[in-house]
Amino acid sequence: MKATLIKIKELAKRPLITGTLILTVTGLVSRLIGFFYRIYLSRLFGEENMGIYQLISPVVSLAFSLCAAGYQTAVSKLTAEMAACHDGKNTGSSFWPFVASVTISLPLSAACTLVTYLLASPIGCLLLKEPRTVPLLRIIAFSFPFVGIHACINGWFYGMKKAGLPSLAQIIEQLTRVGCVFLLTSKDLAMGNVPSIGTAVLGLALGELVSMAVAVLTFLPFLPRKRMHSSAKAPAKIYHGLLGMALPLTANRLTLTLLGSMESVAIPEMLRAYGYNTETALSVYGVLTGMALPLVFFPNALTGSISVMLLPMISENACLGKMKEVRSLTLKTLRYCLWIGLACLGTFVLFGPFLGSAMFRSPLAGRCIRTLGWICPFLYLDTTLSGILQGLGMAGRIFLINVLSLLLRLAFVYLAVPVFGIRGYLWGMLAGQLLLTLLYVLSLHRLLHVKKDPQK
């Protein structure tokens, strides 16, 4: 018993294990809340409204890519490197990446809010090709600054290997979102009114506001008491390092998001080319993106947590020249993710139709879940492989690989969906994930065999 307790204490001291455990538990709780929330929305609003709700996702993703995603990753990596130079101590200089990121991210997110709100009509009618998305876009636009600040704070926490506090904000965000929507829709139903899908978007924006507020409150105690001194690097160099990493990441993310947005907008259009009317096309799109995909992506909470914690760990070890440790971490985590993927493949292929009917009351969702089950081993591996390659400074390679995968999927959307319906898109997803995994593995194999430990 004593030996077991000692072993547990030793494991708890390892940042990758403890951080991954915290992110996994909170990620699972958050996804469970979100998953049952999706079931509630699908039953309350129906398949067509779920399709309209999902159509605003490309705009939200574009805003996040422009003002948050690249800066969160860059802050995490730079903070980890600066903390490593000071033996992991929380020095004032470790806050410079955060300060620099906020002064860039906040104006960008404010600009995104202004543009989205003022141009909601042309974006909804001309780009998304659905006028009913216009009021939804105007609501969600106000959440962009909250997302930008929250992402910068999370980047600092992940870089310092403090995963618990961002996880707390994530759960509070989900609870706020679900609670607001439940209260507002319950009030409408009690008055005999039909709830609007705009209520779900309002809940989304309020959740981001509360999440940012929690992140700020948890971040304040870590701020240095005295004036920060740039003992490691001058502030100008911090901006240079941050932008040098964030701008390529942002450009890559924007390109990938634009391609993904083209895919999202094209699916309903190609379904109409297959022979569906607008209502049926939006319903099928809503079933796929609002029901089947969230269920298949649910176990990604496990591998996604590993990926987030791996980036600073891999970056730190690679910076110190400990390539043997990098290889060991890589092999262990890939083996773990592969087993998760195989277990999920069996579950979704065998029980997909039952899960679709029981959870969403949709036989189509069940068929989609069964087909999508085949991508699970590759999907969960890709998340981790991407985190490892980012930690090794291979953002450019990741970008090219993802572009190739998305182009292949787009080809299936435009060529296969008009002929085979939604099955054509599902086949495209499988082909895209296979290509992604193959190219990731080849890149990582080559990189780890080229780099050697300096002592060797």
Image (cartoon, rainbow, N blue to C red):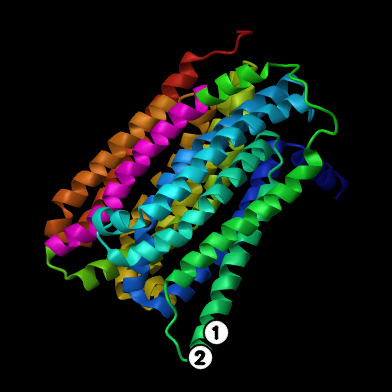
| Direction from residue 24 to residue 70 in the image, left or right | left
Q: Which residue is mark 1?
A: 187
Q: Are marks 2 and 1 in contact (CB under 8 Å)?
A: yes
Q: In terms of depth relative to the viewer, which is nearer, 254 or 420?
A: 254
Q: The disc labelled 1 sits on which kind of residue?
A: Lys
> Pointer 2: residues within 10 angstroms few (<14), some, or many (20+)?
few
The image shows residue 371 at horizontal and vertical percentages of 31, 59
Label the magenta part by its dominant secondary structure.
Answer: helix
Q: Is residue 203 visible?
A: yes
Give the residue at x 55% y 33%: 104
Q: Which residue is mark 2?
A: 191
The image shows residue 120 at horizontal and vertical percentages of 36, 56
In the rendered view, would you say 425 is above or below 250? below
Give the residue at x 54% y 78%: 184
> Pointer 1: residues within 10 angstroms few (<14), some, or many (20+)?
few
| Tally of numbered tags | 2
Q: In terms of depth relative to the viewer, which is nearer, 71 or 392?
A: 71
Give the residue at x 47% y 50%: 113
Magenta span: 244-273
Helix, strand or loop at label 2? It is loop
Tag of residue 113: none
The image shows residue 19 at horizontal and vertical percentages of 68, 43
Q: The disc labelled 2 sits on which kind of residue?
A: Met
Helix, strand or loop at label 1? It is helix
In the rendered view, would you say 354 is above or below 216? below
